[in-house]
Each structure stands twice: as C-alpha cells, then as structure tokens.
Amino acid sequence: MRMTGSLKFVRNPSKKVLLEQKAHACPKCKHAESVMLTRSERQWILFNQCVSNMVRVQYECSRCSWKNQELPFDLSEPLDDFYYESSDSLHRWLL
C-alpha cells in the first residue's frame, strides 16, 4: 500500500538584504570595501507551515566570509565632528 502524502521537511534558502550602502574594510582579509551590514532570514517549513524563523543582523565579508555582530573600532578613520566638540560648545548648542 502506497501513501500519497509524505512528510516534508524543507529549509528555505536564506534571504540576505543589505542594510547599508557604505562598505567597510575587512579586519581579517584587509580588503578595503568587502564588508557590509546584512540582515539574513532563514525559515524551516514543515507541512507547509513555518516552524522556525531566524533573523540575524551582522557584518559579513564577501571575500573571506568573516562575520561579526559589530566592526572593530578603527582609530585611523576620522570620527564625526560631534565627538570632537567640547562639553562647553555642546552646552551652548543645547541652549
């Protein structure tokens, strides 16, 4: 006797969405513009119903597959002007 229905356990391929337009230097392979902030989604489907949905936001290198939640702080890049303001000038700005 043959069953017409069967148990199907399917993992959908993950979707990746770029969240930034600016690329960053990779701390591992040192490529100048290969790291982007991405959001990836992965779903597990059983009997046509989603049983698990995982969303992750992280930095990923397109060259060496380096991944991390945040970029290492680089002192060679200039900081925004806001960080260089003295507390006195910031106080005047707030008033």
Image: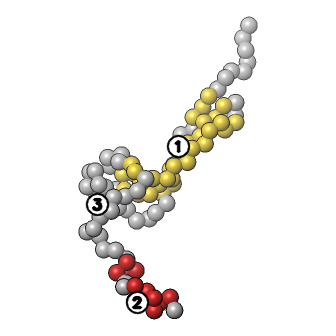
The disc at residue 14 is 1
Between 70 and 51, the one lying in front of the other is: 70
Q: Residue furthest top?
A: 1
Q: Amino acid at mark 3?
A: Ala
Residue at the spot 40% in from the left edge and 80% down from the top edge: 82
Between 19 and 88, the one lying in front of the other is: 88
The residue that disc 2 covers is 89
Which of disc 2 and disc 1 is earlier in sequence?
1
On screen, residue 25 versus residue 12, left or right, reads left
Q: Amino acid at mark 1?
A: Ser
On screen, residue 45 versus residue 91, left or right, reads right
Residue 33 shows up from this direction: no
Between 35 and 87, the one lying in front of the other is: 87
* Distance from Cα at disc 1 to Cα at disc 2: 48 Å
- Mark 1, secondary structure of its residue: loop
Which of disc 3 and disc 1 is earlier in sequence?
1
The residue that disc 3 covers is 32
Residue at the spot 62% in from the left edge and 38% down from the top edge: 52
Q: Amino acid at mark 2?
A: Ser
- Give how far across and how far down residue 39 sits, in percent: 51, 53
Q: Is residue 10 above or below residue 94?
A: above
Q: Residues within 10 Å of mark 2 (few under 14, many from 20)?
A: few
- Give how far across and how far down residue 10 sits, in percent: 60, 31
* Distance from Cα at disc 2 to Cα at disc 3: 35 Å
Residue 95 shows up from this direction: yes
Which label sits in the foreground, 1 or 2? 2
Residue at the spot 29% in from the left edge and 54% down from the top edge: 27
